[in-house]
Amino acid sequence: MTVVQRVSASLAAVLDDYAEFMTQAGLLKPKYRRFNLRLAERFLTVLAQQPGDTWQERWTELEAQYDLIFAETRPHWQSVQRRVLCTLICMRVFRPSLAFLVRPDCMWLKEYFWKTEAAEYYPSACETGRSRNVATHSLSTSMQLLARISLHQGKPLLDTTEGDFLEFAGLASTAGAALAGTRGVSTASEILRDLGVKVPLMHAGQKQRAGQFSVEYLVERHGVVSPGVRELLIRYLQERAPALDYGSLDNLAAILVRNFWRDIEHHHPEVTTLALPPHVAQAWRERYAHKPNGERRRNALDGFTAVRAMYLDLREWALSDPERWGGHVYASPVTLSHLAGGSKQKRQRRAEMQAHTRFIRPYVGRLVVHSRHRLELAQGLLKETRAQPHGERFVFRDTEYERPGTAENRRSWTLASDGRTPVMVQRVADGAKWNAEIEEERAFWTWAIIQVLRLTALRVEELLELTDLSVMPSIVDPAVKVLHVLASKTDQERYLPIDPELMSVLAAIKRRAKGRDGRVPLIIAYDLVEKTHSPPLPFLFQHVTHGSRRLFRQGTVNEMLRRGAVQAELLTPQGDLVRITAHDFRRVYATEMVNGGLPLHIAALFLGHANLETTRGYVAVYEQEVLQQYGAFIARRRKSRPEGEYPQPTAEEVQEFAEHFRRRTVALGRCFRPFRTPCHHEHACVRCGSLAMDADQLPRLQRIEEETQAFLEEARQAGWSADIEGYETTLIHLQEKKAQLGRIAAASPPEHGAE
């Protein structure tokens, strides 16, 4: 590709090249030719009046006054003015600054650059987007970035280097347009790599992250006034640093420097050492125990413990190394009496967590069901919309939709000549319009995140660190697949067995993440806590945003769960939205495992807990489990008592007992509710935990599910909120009964002669 520089050409030569340039590229329509050329001549005439020997020198003088000089052309000639400006930039007549390139005046640079100078590489860029499942708007962002870099650096596209990306990103950050310098960098680097340019795989913000700060900076950033205390805090944190990860070190520095010492200096500037007078120490404890709004700080004891630990460490180190620490033995402002309420607060916090688990558990089940239904609806609507021509109305699931507009008349789709146009859909009833592809993408990832959290109880950071390499054969039995979970909070990796349901979910995620080459793309992740970059890995939970492949962030995961709760209409009896976080799935998972009979220490291994008390705090105890354990206790006690204390039942009682269970045969199986107890579910057997399903009644159960689904759709259309909640609850129990039948079938021996 040859780049023609015109910075020293004459005005007449530039005008001749301008007309030829626009005509060959098909950018100059005949009806606007005369007006466009006249405006280009006027623009160049104004530019030629500026001081300088070349067009670049003149533009440097004019750029700062651009809005003032061409104010009269706005807004009447704004569109044509922008086209003229972008054409001259693509002709390499002059090079604007980066701050000017990111302005709306340069909105046509991408289209003109890829239709003229880089036209031969345009098919390859589109193929890169297709092979990696990059959305149209994200591919457009990456191509815009490449055009800006090439035009700003004044070099051909294939001469772009990693340094050009980093320099452009740095200039963009300095100019106050950091996003313009980083958006699309991942796909942009892949476009160049496919063209044979040797640039490394990059991602947005890779080189702009500050990384881990030094201990000196962690202390000095808070503006400590006293030099002696500043030096002591730095030495203390440096001594503690080898035993702490960076996140814990950063948090400790914030407590000791910002929350403790800087607060002392702010309210008591006369204090210059860690030897605090009693009234100063008491005043600090009172301030720290409450937030600025007066609310009591829940983790105040953690701060008190950190401050007390520092004073005790200094005292101990002074005994072992008096030369370094001998002059820093002070009375701690936090005594054991100030930490006396710690056990009580822990018990209260555990009780609150368990009460929250009991409250949130049914809502989690409803969210799981809704996420699956939402995905089925989004996928079906996307498929149906793609099959319809533009402007055609159609009916999907008893709702009328329309695929609006025509692709040929959409200016924003001009660059997407590869046929990958947005699939817009509009609901006729209320006129709501949305991108069916984006909705299907959001529905899929919401469903995938919920399913993996539900089936594994991973921490959210562990979820996002899953890669294509995390699924591996077990060392004990290679036929069994396990999920390798990297070390996170407890610095201990673990392996979780993968059941068929989880395997199907992971396979669906892999199909979504991988490109057309059949591989999951390698991306670089940034740990916001440890402030480190990972090596390029095939992360499963990656998505394309503004042309860059990135991991989902923890905040994004919780926001997707919040949106799911809104769409599922998960409301409390008072009408407030139920807030479900990723960590709620761990608590529900632990509760179901332990209440289902799994030993507590095994549950701790599944959850990655180093302390059984932590797992015990996760488990919410229900009244039913209490009664079951009490019944087992009574049975064990009876075995140790004389037989005469428990009389034998009479024949009439035995007959009555047998008749009770003989009469408990129902349509779906048998009812095993306790003897002489009423039916608490008013014969709604599908909701009852005492129902033992008959394996031959699966067709009947499926018919009940279809009828309930039909009733639910009718209730939604009619707005019967009470019935909606009832039908959704019934559907959840129907799924549980179907799972029960699946377990029965899996546990049943094969019939004679079956293979």
Image: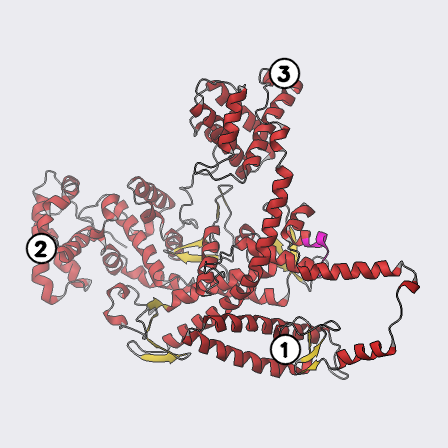
User: Foreground: 17 or 742?
Assistant: 742
Residue ID for mark 1: 683
Disc number for residue 322: 3
Element type at mark 3: helix
Q: How many labels does the image show?
A: 3
Q: How far apart are marks 1 and 3 (CA)?
A: 79 Å
Question: Mark 2, residues whose alpha carbon is within 10 Å: few (<14), some, or many (≥20)?
Answer: some
Residue ID for mark 2: 39
Lower sequence index among marks 3 and 2: 2
In-image side of 311 versus 374 (left or right):
right
Residue 599 falls inside the magenta stretch: yes
In-image side of 424 versus 474 (left or right):
left
Residue 676: percent from the left, percent from the top?
74, 73
Q: Nearer the viewer, mark 3 or mark 2?
A: 3
Tell me whether circle 3 and circle 2 mark residues in contact (CB < 8 Å).
no
Q: In which quarter of the image is residue 69?
A: top left
Q: What residue type is labelled 3?
A: Pro
Element type at mark 2: helix
Q: In this view, does 373 lie above or below 139?
A: below
Q: Is residue 226 above or below residue 573?
A: above
